Amino acid sequence: MIRTQIYLPKSQLDKLRQKARRENATVSHVIRIMIGADLAPRRAKNKKSESFTEAVRRINKLGTRAPRDLARNMDKYLYGNV
C-alpha cells in the first residue's frame, strides 16, 4: 500500500470515525472500502439491461405477442416511421 494524506472537513472526519467505530474497523479501512465500491465497474454492480430476446420473452409472458418482424423493423416500432 502507498501512504497518502488528504484534507477533510471536520464533519466528514467525524462521520468516518463514527462509521469505523460501528463497523469495528479503522478509518483508513472504511475509506478504502468506500473508494473501492465507488470505483468498481458499474456493470459488475448491477445488471439492469436485458437482451433483445429476453425483452421479447418478457413481453410474450404478459400475453401480448411481439410482432413477427420486430427484429427487422425495430426502429419503426421504437421511433415510428424512420
Image (cartoon, rainbow, N blue to C red):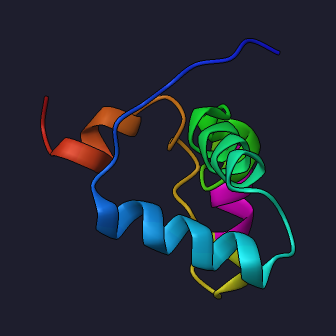
Left or right: residue 15 compared with residue 33 = left
Determine whether 68 is above or below 10 in the image. Answer: above
- Residue span colored magenta: 53-58
Determine whether 1 is above or below 78 in the image. Answer: above
Magenta stretch contains residue 62? no
Left or right: residue 64 compared with residue 54 = left
Residue 82 in the image: state x and y as whole percent: 13, 28
Residue 62 in the image: state x and y as whole percent: 64, 87
Residue 4 in the image: state x and y as whole percent: 58, 19
In the rendered image, which quarter is residue 48 located in?
A: bottom right
Determine whether 20 is above or below 63 in the image. Answer: above
Residue at x 57%, y 80% (from the top left corner): 64
Using the image as rendered, state which of residue 55 and residue 72 is in the foreground.
Answer: 55
Using the image as rendered, state which of residue 27 and residue 48 is in the foreground.
Answer: 27
Overall secondary structure of the magenta section = helix
Regarding residue 40, the answer to whether it shows in the image is yes
Residue at x 66%, y 31% (from the top left corner): 41
Left or right: residue 63 compared with residue 9 = right
Residue at x 49%, y 28% (from the top left corner): 72
